[in-house]
Image: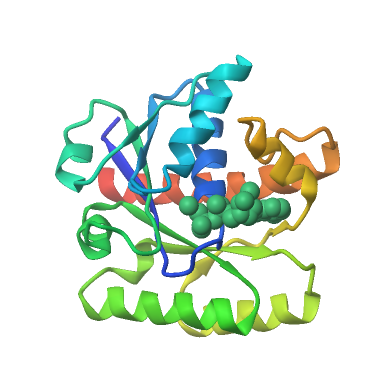
Amino acid sequence: MQKLIVSLLGLKGGSGKSTTARMLATAYAEAGLSVKIADFDVWQQTASQWSARRLGKGHKPDVPVECFNSIKKVLREPCAIMICDVAGNPEVSALKIAEASDVILIPTDVSVDDLASQLSFIRQLVNAGIDRSKIMMVVNNLYENATASEAAREAISAQGLAHTKSELVGRPAYQNAQNQGLAVYQTQFASLNDRALNVAREIIEFVKSKTEDKAA
Ligand SMILES: Nc1ncnc2c1ncn2[C@@H]1O[C@H](COP(=O)(O)OP(=O)(O)O)[C@@H](O)[C@H]1O
Ligand SMILES: [Mg+2]
């Protein structure tokens, strides 16, 4: 398998980058793939601290996380899949990370404020030469606003961008799971886990389709 770089990018803090990175990395690790999260948020180290909680609680499988400040170092890692969790205001260039990525995931809430900010960020990437076909927006609907969700999806589609059909809703159980070093599909509630898994599966399918492009 060729090395894959999947990056979580976006200007907005709190949009779900670290949540998505941890969910995806856990799912890949459970599937037996060699995966590591590259924590580019070197100041907050959200992913690294989550990994420490995970180790402390003895959850299996291990999801390795390491801090990075250079995409070149990520490219030298022996892992099959590197998931780059990038801060909204990274010390390193988001463009450099985007260029090196096979897939760029941009989480967004469905509010106009959040979406507009993320779409403007995507426009900057595309204007700088990033192929929009490798971008997928991960739609989060924290307040379960069906009207806003529909409008957001229309706006995303109008830009010719891929997006998840399923969405994470805001639930304390998702936060509690992450507080315990678990992924959002590992809450105590089967229906919430299914919802989160649907999002993870869609992303994994998208990544797979891009791997096939790469192999072709
Ligand atoms: N669906 C959700 N329900 C409840 N809490 C969530 C949900 N998604 C994210 N969170 C919480 O919101 C905060 C921000 O999410 P995070 O993934 O860290 O965003 P980012 O990495 O983009 O800054 C975290 O505390 C996380 O646990
Ligand atoms: Mg984060």
**How are the colours assigned in the image?**
rainbow
Label count reads 0
Split into 4 quadrants, where in the image is the N terminus?
top left
- Which residue is nearer to you in this view: 164 or 47? 47
Position of residue 101 in the picture relative to residue 179 (left or right): left
- Which residue is nearer to you in this view: 3 or 177? 177
Position of residue 206 in the picture relative to residue 123 (left or right): right
Camera sees residue 93: yes
Q: Is residue 142 above or below residue 110?
A: above
Position of residue 204 in the picture relative to residue 169 (left or right): left
Report x, y in % for residue 63: 48, 26
- Which residue is nearer to you in this view: 16 or 34? 16
Q: Furthest-front residue in view?
A: 43
Residue at image coords 71%, 33% = 186
Q: Which quarter of the figure has residue 131? A: bottom left
Residue at image coords 56%, 68% = 108
Camera sees residue 59: no
Report x, y in % for residue 68: 26, 40
Q: Is residue 84 above or below residue 78?
A: below
Residue at image coords 21%, 76% = 128
Q: Is residue 101 above or below residue 165?
A: above
Q: Which quarter of the figure has residue 145? A: bottom right
Q: Is residue 58 above or below residue 174?
A: above
Report x, y in % for residue 173: 78, 43
Residue at image coords 14%, 43% = 72
Position of residue 131 in the picture relative to residue 65 (left or right): left
